[in-house]
Amino acid sequence: MADHFVIDGSNLATEGNTEPSLAQLREAVNAFRSEHPGTTVTVVVDASFEHRIDPSERAAFSKAEIATEVVSPPAGAVGRGDGFLLQIANRTNATVVSNDSFQEFHAEYEWLFEPGRLIGGKPVPGVGWIFSLRRPVRGIVSRKTTQRAKKEARDQDQVRDAIAEATADAMSSTTGRRRRRGGRGRTTTTTTTPEPEAVNQPAPFLQFVIDHRLGTEVYGVVDSFSSHGAFVIVDDVRCYVPIGAMGEPRPSKARDVLTRGETRTFIVQAVDAPRRGIELALPGFAKVAGAPSDETVAAEVKGNRPKKTATKGAATKPAKAPAKKAPPAKAPAKKTVKPAPTKKTTAKAPAKKTVKPAPTKKTTAKAPAKKPATKTPAKKTTAKAPAKKPATKTPAKKPTPQKQGRRR
């Protein structure tokens, strides 16, 4: 048997009526206490309970509230009195006394379906209040809430797995190694390189994911625009807002909705852990998902491409410079042609001055000096061949001067 009960005062006070009644609530509480003596009973009502009861009962309600006979949540509390009531029951492990099924809280408080955790009560004319165990009713709201909670849990699991993988990749990139699962439980080691398309650095990205969960609000500054969205800076992290997340119907341009340099409120819509990217949306148009849209990935890839092409262009420019230096290479080829006639003139001069001994000495002395200038030193054997040719030509010239002498 439970030793702590939390009574939904607004529910019991309105049972069978259109407006709550403080007198009916007191009857229900007294009847329940009589059935469960020695237990702790906490009565919770809505913040608007005082304004909905009959004006003649308001003074009595104020006294009961001061005496802590009833408790009401702070104004503006999420879920009104139901959320406040279930928090108390959850913390104290208490049994809830209410005819409500709390469908919007089924995903958060699954213990409502445990036996003995929910009791209903109704007044029976001529008998009084009857309390009995009950189970919450699952309806459309319950199914939607549960499905949404499961989807968010899956998304969070995917994000955590992706963050873990991205962290492992970032750490392995420093060593250039990464271990992968192979076939039949074997592991293979492959060399990897850092992701070239990473949008953010590992440290700021991981801190962003820790500080801002999916579906939460962030404040960012509009940095630049693309053809189908805008880039936003949040806590030194570069995020992207696709046009599809700016309004319904989609605006034609991001500039029609955002202004460069302004600070706006955005919703974290998706996380791309492997590429360390964040997808945002404007409030009211967010569709939380475990992965970013193709539109965001394409825009971020294009945003990174100019940096790569700039480096390629810088590398191709020096390659053209050597091609321009080719013309100076032709100048030395022309210079080598000019010394050739000088050698021929020097060869003709000694032939005129001397008759016998002079040509043999000068030709042998000058022939090696002329030929190394025009040819490589390796071809010294060719230098001896021309030395023999002038020796054969000189005797051929001797008879001509003798014939001239006889004529004289």
Image: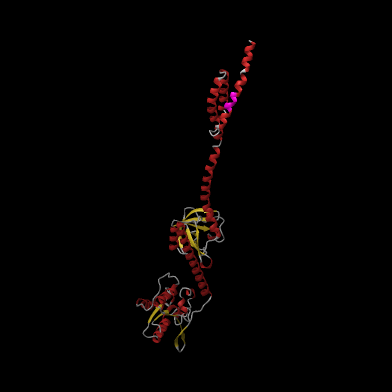
Q: Is residue 255 above or below residue 70?
A: above
Question: Looking at the picture, how far across and down is residue 231, in whole percent?
Answer: 50, 55
**Residue at point 53%, 55% (across, down):** 301
Q: Which of the 4 image quadrants contains residue 93? A: bottom left
Which is nearer the eye, 81 or 101? Answer: 101
**Colour mapping used in the image:** secondary structure
Q: Which residues are magenta?
A: 386-391
Q: Is residue 256 visible?
A: no
**Image label count:** 0
The extreme bottom residue here reads 126
Please say whether residue 137 is one of the residues in the magenta stretch: no
The residue drawn where x is 58% and y is 21% is: 348
319 or 239, nearer to the observer: 319
Dominant secondary-structure state across the stretch colored magenta: helix
Of 105 and 41, which appears nearest the observer?
A: 105
Residue 320 x/y as whole percent: 55, 41
* Residue 388 is covered by the magenta coloring: yes
Instruction: Work out which residue is located at the far left of the displayed protein and give it.
Output: 67
In percent of width and height, residue 327 lies at: 56, 35
- Quadrant location, the C terminus: top right
Relative depth, front residue between 6 and 225: 225
- Whether residue 386 is visible, yes or no, is yes
* Residue at the spot 47% in from the left edge and 65% down from the top edge: 160
In which quarter of the view is residue 343 placed?
top right
Query: As drawn, which residue projects farthest toward the top?
Result: 408
In this image, 203 relative to 247: left or right? left
List x then y, in percent, for residue 15.
47, 81
Is residue 96 positioned above or below 239 on the image?
below
Q: Quadrant of the N terminus?
A: bottom left
Decide if residue 112 is on the left or right side of residue 394. left
